[in-house]
Amino acid sequence: MMPKVSVIVVSYNAADQLESCLRSLAALPEVQRDASFAQVIVSDNGSADDSVARAKLAFPGVEVIENKANLGFAKGCNAGARSATAPLLFFFNPDAVAHRALLENAVAYFDAHPDVAMAGTKLLDEDGSVAESCGEFDTWWQSFLRSSAWGDLPMFRTQANGYKLRQWDYSTERDVDLVVGAAMFIRRDVFEQQGGFDERFFLYHEEIDFAHRLRDAGKRVVFLPQCVVTHLSEQGGSRKTWGKAGVLNWRQRSRRLYWIKRHGRLWYWSLSAALAGRYVLYVAIVAGVVVWIRSVLR
């Protein structure tokens, strides 16, 4: 029997997190009732730990693709998707845990909404708080605000959403520009039509680029609050593998690639010049204050 959903987990040296992730999937009521409900695929990027062995124990029937090398997230996802047979794909981080009826709720929604191509889940942090997990595409001004940290100023916060929709409680379904890639559903036929994720994105921004392609094609992307996942991003995943500095480096590289791909080099270099120019502004302000203080003291 064809599965309702193909779950694709890309993993790299994350045995503990991967085992927890797969056990949460195996414990879902819809999977307990019907073993054929979900096809679970682990795309292993050359792990040197015991990830593969523990995956096979955690989820009976799991399909493991051993890539023999760290291909990155986008390429690892594409490798997993080529083995998928269900009409709905679910890309799921190994450092995440499924909540009750996660897959069942998503399948029911996509069955009832044939015009929706991609959906994100409600993400919870480990302490149970709601994480900001979907957003809007950057304009030049929004990119400047977020990259300069000016977006954290109260007067600019609502103009600097990016991949975080602020001033919203994530409690209702809504159409969005983009969703965070830790837990996202995509129709398989749409994924294949779009050629999968752009493999130039080794880590980060592949889902934003894909969502942008969907908008260009007139497809809907939505947020589904009834599909809930806990994302343990602080203790596992990319930060554990690459460290804080490594994660920042990959984010910056992927953001640069995305901006140039989507907006062109002139857009990117003008933004870079503005970001560099703000330091000149800071220096000018400090110099002005110093001159003023000296004039007062005289």
Image: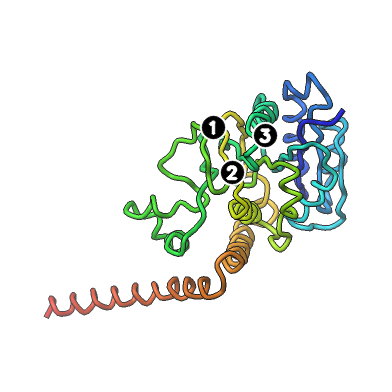
Instruction: State the residue position of label 2.
Output: 221
Give the label, 1 or 2, closer to the camera. 2
Q: Report which residue position mark 1 lands on.
A: 128
Residue placed at 87% from the left, 49% from the top? 66
Number of residue marks: 3
Residue 240, how many percent across, how many down?
67, 50
Q: Position of residue 208 (x, y in %)?
A: 60, 53
What is the CA distance from the residue labelled 1 to the residue labelled 3? 12 Å
Tell me which label, 3 or 2, sits earlier in the chain: 3
What residue type is disc 1 on? Gly
User: Secondary structure under badge 1?
Assistant: loop
Q: Quadrant of the C terminus?
A: bottom left
Q: Is residue 239 left or right of residue 293?
A: right
Q: Residues within 10 Å of mark 1 (few under 14, many from 20)?
A: few
N-terminal-most mark, 1 or 2: 1
Residue 163 appears in view: yes
The residue lying at 67 percent from left, 45 percent from top is: 236
Pick whichever of labels 1 and 3 is earlier in the sequence: 3
